[in-house]
Image (tube, rainbow, N blue to C red):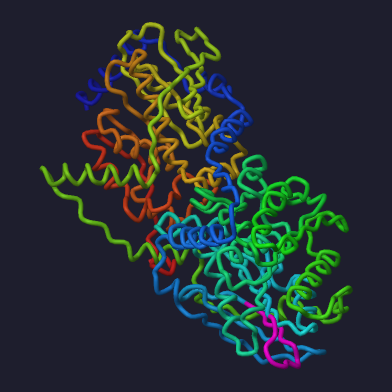
Amino acid sequence: MAGRIYGMAIAAVCVLIAGIGYGQTTAESLKSLLAQPVQTTDVTAFQLQQYLSHRITPLPAPTNANDWTARQQQLRKHILDDIAFHGWPADWVHSAPIFQQEGSTETRDGYRVSRFRYEIVPGFYAPAVLYVPEKIEGHVPAILNVIGHEPMGNAAEYEQKRSINFAKRGIIALSLGWVGFGEMRIKEDDHDDAAALDLVGSNALGFFYLGMRRGLDYLASLPQVDPTRLGMTGLSGGGWQTIVLSATDPRIAVSAEVAGFGSFAFNIAHARDADEIEENATDLNQGSDYTFLTAMRAPRPTLLIHNAEDDCCFRAALVKPDNYDRIKPYFNLYGKADALAWYESSDPGTHNYQLVNRLHAYSFFAEQFHLPAITEEIPSSTEIRTPEELTSGIPANNLTITGLARKLAANITRPAIPSTGSDRASWSITQRQKLKDVIRFSPVAVENAWRITATKHMAMRTISYRFDLSNGLSATGIWLKANDAGDNSPATIILNDSGYEASSEAVSRHVNHGEQVLSLDLIFNGFTRPQTPDSTDWETLVSSAGDRPLGLEVSQLLGIAHWLRDNGAHNQIQIETDGIRSSVIAEVAAALEPNAFDVITTHHGMKSLRYLLDTPVAFRNAPDLFCLDLYKYFDVDSITTIAAPTKVTNIAEIESQPKDADGATK
């Protein structure tokens, strides 16, 4: 007992000596200092606009029809093979459609209605409703009707009225449900959950693409359908589906898109208009964008409808220059100038596919399919069915998007980490290059370290910095040091998932130990966010342009570490992190430059990236971690092994609850 008291006394004396040697701070005393933003969100957003504007690929100048037709074929192959179907099993991609009818066919006034569930990928079903004219002679046109972010799914009133009218006009209409809406509005089927597919190595775009293409495959397989008269239409997210599928699948002869997309340039200027993961799918805007997709419709008839006062997205006057004006010359190459049509809706001018917009679509399809002209809608209000009446009956054990990601993850195999020696050294070199490729790493340097504010009180000096990097982006941070700490005092970089304003406890501890501290907010974090915390507009735009948010963060951390070493941190730099995002950023940075840091201490980090799937972690809480292929090729253990000789210690490590491939907790 006496020995224990003696030890406690010695410890107390050591603390007292430390207090005498360096000015003491407390976490509480630092809170107000660390709560001061160095940069506002609009500055970061502007920098990202500038950065991304250099990644816009301009449309090639139209030359002749043959050249553009050949270019279309190349673009289709690239968009599908290299982007959408990246990482997807070939047998899933090329399988025949599976549509299972649920219940009996209902005969109505001039048409029949059947409910189906169809397979997107094995174990994952979605709903569909088929509207067929009661009397069919020969082969008739068919139209794929797709919904957007519509809570009622394909039971939406405007979706039913449009499908009913097509059927009464002699056109087969298939109304596809969309995952996350209608009867599929369930946990782990939100579109954000598709980020997990990227993480395990299958581009999320492929899932959405297969979902809509299955409907087209089914329509094309029906014996009553004229394969030369296939059409597609939809509002909002349905308009997005329409332009993506109709541009990349030549079978769609006629399309009518409503308020579904803007060019990449438009999206950069209006980031909130395209804040869905599928709209800014990874790499989709690298080397091409939605202007390319629209031009790829030439010379097939294409109607673009946008709303004058749209209260959601893609307002007519703002998207017309890129969506329509710039595309006309490509249709002119084929002598088909009138095949590209534009309508600006003002009745109502809000986000809609109501009567006036429907009439324009009916008229366009009738003209292009060589049917009698349509000038009015056939009344059908009394024929609208409730969501319950249109329910297709999704299986109780249906996969979810997150469950599908877990299923794909269960099939991941990685080579074992070599134990020691030259084998591990050569393995580390190969893996390091692979990691650079996965996060699209491009090194940056600090071009200017702007001193914004400074203080000198509480026996401590501070300087707040804005770090302008060589790629045009920036990070911010606050440097702190006790007045009596030496010039060559050890340096610690502190990262916190909640920003440097949440790092007062860690900062206080390191300053009181005589260290110089840089509490840092990298891009997409803390006060260097380009948007509100619940938004991921810019992260998805960056990924869509071919970069990776994680890669930008890692490059900033390494660039600022080099600057810190060149400006007074002559000893090795250590890092302390708090949270899953900052821990991965630090560990990946050390893996890419193993001699950049001496020690990394992480609090509340992950034992495995599998934690992102098993929890599951919401995409908008950690968008940088859902990096395409990251978990397919790496896990925390392999990353920290590559980081050697950097010592990585995880305190209060978070462990996931193991789940099986279908998502059930083991």
Quarter of the rendering containing residue 648: top left
Pick whichever, 160 or 626, lies toward us. 160
Quarter of the rendering containing residue 160: bottom right
Pick whichever, 344 or 557, lies toward us. 344
Q: Residue at x 76, y 85 (%)?
A: 170
Query: Is 132 a magenta residue?
Result: yes
Q: Residue at x 29, y 14 (%)?
A: 13
Quarter of the rendering containing residue 190: bottom right
Q: Which residues are magenta?
A: 128-141
Pick whichever, 222 or 69, lies toward us. 69
Whole-percent x and y of residue 303? 73, 63
Total labels: the figure holds 0
Whole-percent x and y of residue 121? 47, 73
The C terminus lies in which quarter of the figure? bottom left
The N terminus lies in which quarter of the figure? top left
Q: Is residue 415 left or right of residue 656?
A: left
